[in-house]
Amino acid sequence: MKAETIAVGSELLTPDKTDTNSLFITARLNEAGFQVHRKTVIGDREEDIAALVGEALSRSALIIIIGGLGPTEDDLTRQAVSRILRRPLAVDTDLLEAIRGRFASRGIAMPKINERQAQVLEGAEVLQNPRGTAPGMWIEEKNTRIVLLPGPPRELQAMFLASVAPRLSGLRSGRQMVRRTVNVVGLSESEVDSRVSPIYTSYPGIETTILASTAQITLNLSQWLKPGETTGELDELTARIAEALGDTVYSTSGETLEEVVGRQLRDSGNSLAVAESCTSGAVAMRITRVPGSSDYFLGGVLCYSNEAKQSLCAVPACLLEKHGAVSAEVAEAVAQGVRRALNSHIGLSITGIAGPGGGSAEKPVGLVYFGLAGSRGSGHERRVIPGDRESVRERAATYALAYLRRYLLAECRRNPTP
Amino acid sequence: MKAETIAVGSELLTPDKTDTNSLFITARLNEAGFQVHRKTVIGDREEDIAALVGEALSRSALIIIIGGLGPTEDDLTRQAVSRILRRPLAVDTDLLEAIRGRFASRGIAMPKINERQAQVLEGAEVLQNPRGTAPGMWIEEKNTRIVLLPGPPRELQAMFLASVAPRLSGLRSGRQMVRRTVNVVGLSESEVDSRVSPIYTSYPGIETTILASTAQITLNLSQWLKPGETTGELDELTARIAEALGDTVYSTSGETLEEVVGRQLRDSGNSLAVAESCTSGAVAMRITRVPGSSDYFLGGVLCYSNEAKQSLCAVPACLLEKHGAVSAEVAEAVAQGVRRALNSHIGLSITGIAGPGGGSAEKPVGLVYFGLAGSRGSGHERRVIPGDRESVRERAATYALAYLRRYLLAECRRNPTP
């Protein structure tokens, strides 16, 4: 069945902002058997939105309208849809109370303008918004379903999963898109492609795309299946690709690198402390993104200055003087220091030059040392990471997690759990 | 004048890929006096592309069609435009020789399928492609200009700058878009709107949009100016909005919150150390995103566990037992502790419950305390932040920076630089 998305917002028609919600929506619609055949971005003008929805009614079985549900004067999706469908808007008193309650729980009186968000189209079902004040709507108009969703990604995603996906499953046609992912760290995009393209090109029924982001590579495999068809071919290709890429594959289940490392730490009973210099919290941020990470993550230090390396990690001044802050010796000393300071099983450190300044011929911008200290001593890795400041920091965080993953993998092979 | 973009390609309708060419194009079109009022992505189906171009003819003075100009069977832009404009395609022999020559220069015979790329629409001007084989086209149809550009960004950008921009400058209405931004922290989107909508609605010539992201609000003001018109009205509205929002405005120049705080620290000669618990590095990450931040940022501690609060910040165990880790007393003690540990002028701390677990009736998920210690003692702030784990963490980082900004603002008023 044919679906289209409409993203509403003049800010999405500036050079600064793009519609990314439609990627999440497309993935979920494909899973539910819908093919997205058109995506449109339109500005905050009631007559433009209404005209576009009118066109879409004649060509799509499902129309997902994103954004324009806020409380302000430029939030016009409700009015536009009301106009084109000729269905009046009326305040839903239950909804109004719920919105008022949301503000009250934060100790704030609901501003008058938020009343607009309690307006519901005649005959529409209200979709609850657990993460914001803007409710969504589900509207059936002849043979077309129209879904109104809020623009903020967190609100949209939660609402879609809770309220839209279940309704779509009742509509689904025969075909369904099935997807697999393979996540890789430690190889470049072209290295991955040259290893796996001889494999995936022999599966013409499966679409394989390779995406690179901050030192991680994701292979997306997707196939449309008719009722009764199995995922056998897709699983076979996934397994062959994973085999060709070996240990660089950290996940074929969609787990993130920080989730994988977290599971390894938990399973092996190891606790972790980190000492970050140039990344300044990026590694800790990623590790603690995983709920329950306090079970294995004790904390760490941000030893941005040399003084901090000395006072927080007991790195001897002479070591800093002799080798410099960005060196293998200091990386290992900092890892040992933070391990001692927090009394953790493992200490992980990152020290480097993120740029734009601070580089030299001997130690260029992008040079990063990673230190790792455990019960059997310490080790280090050295990398020169290309890109600008932000890119160096983000990639360094990925490489630190990848280093820790390999260390735990090797430890696990030495001491397999019975 | 009104413009729209059409990106052609089924791969842009998958969950993995988005149209980013339109951002480059939008920036160039705005500079040339065109307003982009709609952006569409459409798949590789001739009838869909033709229908969309037909619709666009009735509403836009300029239509930019991106992609679908390759040599393969799913490159259908030429045929679709030919069909809807009822203008035949014919091989341009000069163009064919040029494409053949491009292959020859690389020592390759031109594949037969590339002949298709020499097909030109009746009455169209050919736009040279210095970086690839797909030529573009410039077509005038009644009052509308239609431009066909290749999809690869480096080919598209070079062709646009060399061949499209000069043609547009001949069309320019003289109008040009001028933009201003106002960045706010500490008010909700609806609070901002209720304060400023009475002001901006009295400037109908200026488009004002309000965007919220992680506890920060951005107002974008834009106005089309004719030759000879000044930015006076736009600057007046910007100033009136800034006045109405008072101290909550941290920037009208596009500076980020972390850049503003960094400038305040530098100007006042203060150094900073942070102690992060639930945010686990998010504040330090943002502060150090600014190049040169090592001038005022010394580092900090990630005191995720109670043990870390005690060992790294010398928080007494009895304080943790009596008030709990998430309390005003511990927030202030941690701020004082990190200030001492790093010997900084200011210590900033965050302790809270990011969720999803760990909340109670008395201390719900989202409860965050911020502590600040300086030469004149310490203080704290308390907030209950809505949203999921990631959202609580990101917003808490913003509020911490906002607290520091207000502290430095007040200190600056007490001790103005001569």
Image (spheres, coloured by chain):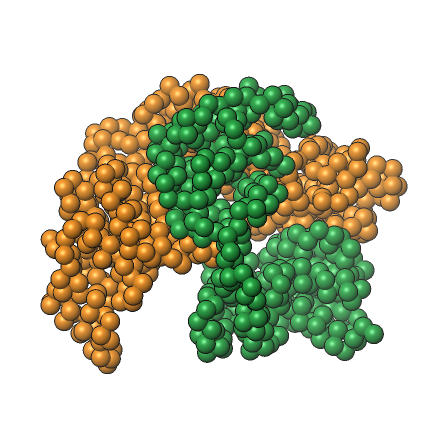
Chain colours: A green, B orange
A12 on left or right of A182 = left
B180 on left or right of A163 = left
Position of residue B320 relative to residue B41, above or below, is: above
B366 on left or right of A62 = right
B412 on left or right of B121 = right
State the residue in front, B161 or B386. Answer: B386
Residue sitting at 49 percent across and 46 percent down?
A21
Residue sitting at 71 percent across and 75 percent down?
A410
- Residue A149 visible? The answer is yes
Residue sitting at 54 percent across and 55 percent down?
A31
Residue sitting at 23 percent across and 42 percent down?
B57
Position of residue B209 relative to residue A360, above or below, is: above
State the residue in front, B307 or B291. Answer: B307
Indicate the position of residue A411 as horizontal and vertical percent values: 74, 74
**Which of the image's four quarters has the N terminus of chain B?**
top left
Indicate the position of residue A84 as horizontal and vertical percent values: 39, 30
- Number of numbered markers: 0
Indicate the position of residue B26 as horizontal and vertical percent values: 32, 45
Indicate the position of residue B73 as horizontal and vertical percent values: 29, 66
Q: Residue extending furthest bottom?
A: B107
